[in-house]
Image: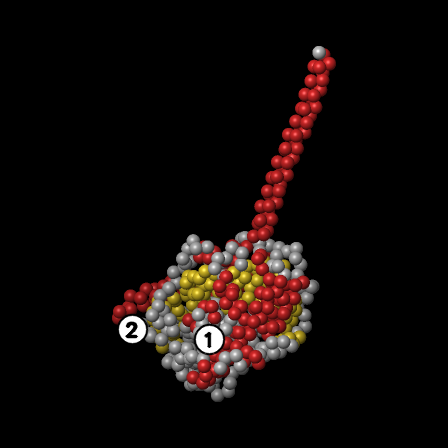
Amino acid sequence: MKLYAEKTALIAIVWLVFAVAGLASVGVAASEAKAAADRRAQSSAEAKRCNVLVLYSDDQQWDTIGALGHPVVKTPNLDRLVKRGFVFRNHYVMGAMGGAVCIPSRAMFHSGRSLWRVANDMSGVPLWGELMHQAGYQTFATGKWHNGPESLLRSFKAGKAIFLGGMSDHFAVPVQDILPDGRLSEKYVGRKFSSQLFADAAIEFLEKRDRSRPFFLYVAFTAPHDPRTPPAEFAKMYAPNSIPLPKNFLPQHPFDTGEMWGRDEMLAPHPRTPEVVRQHLADYYGMISHMDQQIGRVLQALANTGDEPETLLVFAGDNGLAVGQHGLLGKQNLYEHSGRTPLVFAGPGIPSGRSDALVYLHDILPTVCELVGLSLPEGIDGKSLVPVIRGQKQQVREFVFTAYRNLQRAVREPRWKLIKYHIGGVKTTQLFDLETDPWETNNLADDPACAEHRKRLEARLEKARREAGDPVDFENVGGKPSGPRPTAKKTNAK
Ligand SMILES: [Ca+2]
């Protein structure tokens, strides 16, 4: 009996030991499960930090993508991006205080700040590439950088075939690399057409990169900026005589914009003829189609390396261009063709869709930061577009405000648009109903039936100028007239 009792006690002890061990192991398992959950949460936060590939075009009109309904230009690769991505149809560069609109455009793009809150060299403000580097991204740039070497080297830790300028011969681009020690290499001449040169650098990066970290790849094409000299195959892609003239074609602009003889406007004789404008458009579309082909190569490389499912794509343009609309060729005006540029997001978490929300180029940085889970630094003027992309909001603002030098100011609501000019003491006002007149041909500023619209937009313009910190005394002073037409062709780079 005693033996039985001892045996039972022993069994009980053994069981107790097993039970304690079991409980302990349950405890270990529980703490392991918690750690795993923590790791999953962490890795999910890291997974949220998907790669970011930015494709940036130069002087591309907002609608020159086939899938957006353009009647002529062929862009099969951008079409695929547009179909799977989310398109902002009303995307604007806020403007410029000089003829080289590309420079402030890029400053706003890389800082998320508005026109008068970031210098052209972007000194003293946090930059997009810096934020990505601090968050553990591998940063790499290729293509155009128009804001000086200091901001480039602060933004990107690596880069190849970087063009530190405004424009060049597309067949012989002077470029530099970012060396491993963080300095810039000597200049050398790229022996490929610009768009191919930059696409090749991007592809090489994608194939050889450090795969332990997410990447931030910035590819800034110099197409379709002039000189409009597409490679031979693309130069003959569009027959000029079959290209329809824009509905707002004019031989010359009806009044002085203050920038009648700038470099861009001197690329064709005055007055413009249909033949000359059609040739410019054929070359312009050829430049876009060739850039599209090179974008296709970069996107194919992204698919080949397996990175595509984890890469957020941003395609945007820095500013638009007139190319014959309103008698103009350049971007030194506030018409839709010059201020509006393409904007497409695609990738993980981005639905296919389109929005007519009024957005700025400097909204892109806060949007991408939210999408990849980065907090924003102080001083960002742009607004995240994520609520629009996710269908939670229809718009992020009621109107956009745009400015050009001390010469022109504009506001655009979803339907109505006002442009004011103050040049040589002469004030001119244009009011357009974009719903019935998207080509901005019918000025309703003096139509009594539209007086309320004019009054409302003028009030909004003044409010927007104050809020943006517009340094120009536009109402009282304005800008100088263009003066007489120069005899020699201007060649200063833009
Ligand atoms: Ca540009």
Percent x, y of residue 382: 47, 60
Mark 2 residue type? Asp
Which label belongs to residue 72?
Answer: 1
Which quarter of the figure has residue 198? Answer: bottom right
State left or right for residue 386 relative to residue 16.
Answer: left
Who is closer to the viewer here, 47 or 59?
A: 47
Mark 1 residue type? Val
| Residue topped by disc 2 | 446
- Does 198 sit above or below residue 35? below
Residue at x 52% of width, y 70% of height: 76
> Which of the image's four quarters has the N terminus?
top right
State left or right for residue 383 relative to residue 412.
Answer: right
Percent x, y of residue 481: 41, 79
Give the Cα distance between marks 1 and 2. Answer: 35 Å
Q: Earlier in the sequence, mark 1 or mark 2?
A: 1
Residue at x 47% of width, y 82% of height: 240
Which label belongs to residue 421?
Answer: none
- Does 32 sit above or below residue 315? above
Q: Residue furthest right?
A: 3
Q: Is residue 437 visible?
A: yes
